[in-house]
Amino acid sequence: MSSSGSSFTSSSLGRPPTYGRTYASPVDSTWTPTSGISTISAPTTEGSATQTSTLDLGPPGFQATIILFQDTPDERVVYLGPWEVVGSEQRRILWQGSYQNELFEHYLPSDTPSDIHPHTLHSRHRPYYDPADMERYLTFQEPHRIRYTTDEGVCIHDQYIKVRYEFTTVEGSIQFQGDVRRKDLVDFYDVDVVWTNVHGRTDSFGKVKGIGAIQRLKLWRDRYTTFHSLSVWANKTDGQYREYEVHNFDGEVRGRDDRAKQLKLNVHGRRRSTTDDHQHRRFNLAQRMRPRVRTGSSSESRADQPALDIRYLAIQFTERQAPAANSTTPDINPLTLLISSIAAAAMKVILAINAGSSSVKISVFTADKDAVPRQIADVQINGLTAPPAQLTYVRRGKTIIKTKAVAAEVKTQDDAFDLILNTLVDDDTLGEIGSRADISIACHRIVHGGDYDRSQIITQDTYHHLEELSDLAPLHNGVALGIVDTCIGRLPGAVNVACFDSQFHYATIPPHIYTYPINPKIAKSNRLRKYGFHGISYAFITRSVADFLKKDINSLNIIALHLGSGASACAIKDGKSFDTSMGLTPLAGLPGATRSGSVDPSLVFHYASDVGKLSPASTKHLHISVAEEILNKQSGWKAMTGTTNFGEVAASDDPAFKLAFDIFVDRILGFVGSYYVTLGGRVDALVFAGGIGERSAKLRAAVVERLACLGFALDEASNAKPVTSVIQDLGAKGSEHGILVCQTDEQFEMARLCAEKGDLWD
């Protein structure tokens, strides 16, 4: 065992690597050859040898090389371009060779990704300054079948060999390793010795042994679940290689001894049933296994790097409990594959909370920094104002509880929040939440954010500022702040984040649109201007449409309609809000289930004589006038038809219902026509979203029919189909502009904002 240099080296990755481009299929690639020549080096021997061979530099853009017929007169270097992992029963890697028609096939011995173990060496094996550089040299120790066919269709190699790739970049190798394992590399760690309580640290002569003398540990995140695993590649002094894969971390790190420079990690292999219902706690490997001081640049010389703390890592395996009598779980060797998982590394559990006066909805996500959130659960309680309340619980897309009546004591938001937390914590199969302490972030939908143009961590100052804004949205902000209070009390370890419906619009709507023609001084002092709402939804719609159309979001022009019980329209120019129908409050613009939408401001004074007085619905913390009560709660199509269900309104032939339907269509057309002119006719798509926009084919048809003069044409068959994708195309072939429907997801968008909010992770 070497004792010089850094004994425990963290990689320079810092966070899970991301890849902005998609690798093309080798068959479809347009990669072309070149005659440019240079030299690079590749390892030619096993273990820690440093011999190299000189290689010709192939076409620009080649990503790896491999040597065939090594150490024979026929030895040749093959330059490899894009790759693709294909097949299920017989997995193989298809590489494009030096010329477009060449094909290099690497057959994998198992169709189970976890059985495939490409490995790289510890940084001490070669004298590179950057430990990450060792990731470029990738080896499969067990023989794999390699078939190589030339551009003339001649097979010149079809043999089982030990496969060794040399990649041109670290990123390329990491992407390749992840594709083969179906996992993403979070980080790697170099240590001198790893041992377990099964493999003792020393033998009878006091010689250090353990699993291996020089190790590279890698932390992986599964691409299709929230689970992490730690692979330990053992390079033992006796030349025997073995990879251990550890999936279940139990409790906190114990036995850290800085003087002896060692660390213990407890692991267990217990399974309680045949389902994936393993108990575990989150183990933050990235924080606990890093050196205390990190270098600012991975390119610093080794001599300039600070001394590191850890030299030895102990993995202590606990005894497994005997399986239940009715369990069919096979016996598990804890030193091979522990079939369990952890919520580890930088992963955080995020609650996306949307609270109303009569309901509380919480979606649960897991996310890493700058990564796409993964939804694992959804819990909703409705009917708080009309007991008994009903609970609905969905886990990983499967409905576990559907509209179940709950105890009569559940009457308030506090009661509902407690019941939701207990539902999540008590679910043994939801391993990511073993206790309330596992919840890292609670993000709240706040309707009115005033002058905030981005989400905010809720501090005392932020909270008081939002209280001041409650007068602008008394029916919404007061309720949301109530659930914030509850979260602070119930989840003291979580960070609360406010995501505002107004933030999408605030900074981008131009002054001539957001300014009201009233006294400027009074407007400024009282914050009287157009803010706009439904911004969380519009942010999701904008990104999703840009992805669907494969268009740069900064050049996207759309007219978006969020149509639900609360409805609005938005002109999005160059990917940013340019105008929107709602104004100072959500009341302005389109009518809704109980909202009037825009009406003559003097109408309310003719409607009733006491409109300036406080409404009987006001409370100590909720101050609303009679006028606000009338226009927000006693208007809309409910006032005209007696129902808030727009499906009933659209389906009925009753004259009152037809009038309500026609009014809604007319007001939508007014905003679409105005925004069409605002965008100069350069409209990529008209997008329907929200509950009504997604479900009412009749409404979509009525709107688009009257927009034919602007070049919009609807495909009737597509319009009649149920919406099953995030974005669905409804436009006819001859339509000059796109017509789309979007299943907007405000809960996901809130979780995404948290994943991208750097100060939550730094």
Image (tube, helix red, strand yellow):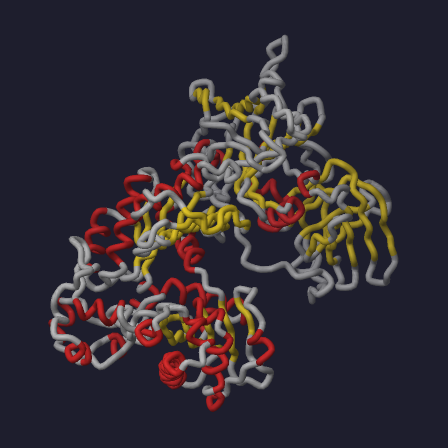
Residue 101 picture location, percent across and down: 78, 63
- The residue depicted at 26 percent of the width and 52 percent of the height is 481
Q: Nearer the viewer, residue 357 or 434?
A: 357
Would you say residue 344 is visible in this rendering?
no
Image quadrant assignment for residue 336: top right
Residue 690 picture location, percent across and down: 43, 67
Would you say residue 261 is visible in this rendering?
yes
Image quadrant assignment for residue 653: bottom left
Q: Is residue 355 above or below residue 195?
A: below
Residue most extreme to the front: 654
Residue most extreme to the top: 204
Q: Nearer the viewer, residue 508 or 6?
A: 508
Q: Nearer the viewer, residue 313 or 576?
A: 576
Q: Is residue 252 above or below residue 74?
A: above
Viewport quadrant of the C terminus: top left
Residue most extreme to the bottom: 709
Residue 75 picture location, percent across and down: 82, 46
Residue 715 picture location, percent across and down: 58, 80
Q: Is residue 129 left or right of residue 681?
A: right
- The residue depicted at 12 percent of the width and 71 percent of the height is 610
Q: Nearer the viewer, residue 595 or 461?
A: 595
- The residue depicted at 87 percent of the width and 55 percent of the height is 155
